[in-house]
Amino acid sequence: MQLLPEAVRRFAAWCAVVLLASGVVYVGIRLCVEFRTAVTPALLALLGTALLRPLHRRLVAAHVQRSLAAGITCVAVVAVVGGAVYIVVAALIESGDQIIASLRTAAEDVAEHFGAAGTSLHDLASNARELLGRFGATAASGVVSGVSVVGETIAMAVLALLLVFFFLRDSDQAVGTVRALVPRSGADMAEAMARRAFGAVEGFMRGTTLIALIDAFCITVGLLVLRVPGAVGLGALVFVGAYIPYLGAFISGTVAVLVALADRGFVIALWALGVVLAVQLLEGHVLQPMIQSRTVQMHPVVVLLAITAGASVAGILGMLLAVPLTAAAFGVVRELQARYAAADPPAESAPGPADS
């Protein structure tokens, strides 16, 4: 190694560090995937704790016992989430038949002008019995697997809610737990990195919630002006979808336009599309720079790459968790940079003519 130039040795050392870090990250991801039924509720509980901790702190400051404050906070979040889900489902059920009828009419028009024989909806309807007889077993197994997925999702949601309760109640002991898990010499650094990572996640959740509220309010007002049915439910869907960057806004906006198309016609659907696009432009060019830049300093390219990586690992759940986890990683990196920058002695400047 001494025969190699200094630049080559430095490059080799950095390659070894990158490969080692990549291997550790890969093994960590694979372990999380294998134990996802336990890891997923824990991560969701951390996000919920970061979002709900200000409310819990206010209750504790008002001399409410910590366990009771945590219980009140969890009941409040269940009421809010349950109410939002009920409003969304009720709105979709109310307009579901109209949406399907509009899509069927549009498909028949397309089939009439461009479709070939045997591809129209009438041909599909006439062959439905044969298709059901051929693929009945597959459909039944799909229903069974779908029921198991729903059951697993409910179990993880209940576990996440219980973890949020314990995380909120015992948050005052978190620092002591972190310091006990690492050697005494690195306790201060571990605590600082944990605080910075959790602060980044808390800032991301707070900023995303504020942006979601503004988006939902603007779209709800626009849909009410256009007299689109289920405007409040669609606004609730926009609020929930805002926690999944880009994809959530696309899905909620698409549903809003379809509902407008089903009940109010093509022109009102275009106006609804304009409202959705205007709100998304407001979010991308005004709200995101003003709000998220103060809480999480991440370039949009980093956000897109994180979402893509999360989707490839865990689908929609990975998209939900990718950005806050990346924000936590950036917080840790910034803490390390600040510590090492403070530890490095400032470079001495060369003496000038006045010093000689």
Image: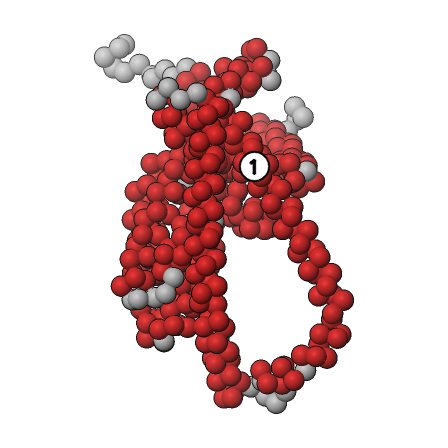
**In the structure shown, which secondary structural element does the residue marked by tag 1 occupy?**
helix
Q: Position of residue 101 (x, y in %)?
A: 48, 76
Q: Position of residue 171 (x, y in %)?
A: 49, 22
- Residue 76 appears in view: yes
Residue at 56% in and 31% down: 163
The quarter in which the N terminus is drawn is top right
The residue labelled by disc 1 is 160
From this view, report whether residue 275 is shown above or below residue 30: below
Q: Amino acid at mark 1?
A: Ala
Q: Position of residue 85 (x, y in %)?
A: 47, 51
Q: Position of residue 245 (x, y in %)?
A: 45, 50
Left or right, 327 with reference to 116: left
The quarter in which the C terminus is drawn is top left
Residue at 26% in and 10% down: 355
From this view, report whether residue 334 is shown above or below residue 174: below
* Snapshot quadrant of residue 274: bottom left
Tell me if mark 1 has few (under 14), some (14-19) or many (20+) residues whose alpha carbon lies within 10 angstroms of its own: many
**Can you name the residue that lies furthest to the left here?**
354
Left or right, 34 with reference to 208: right
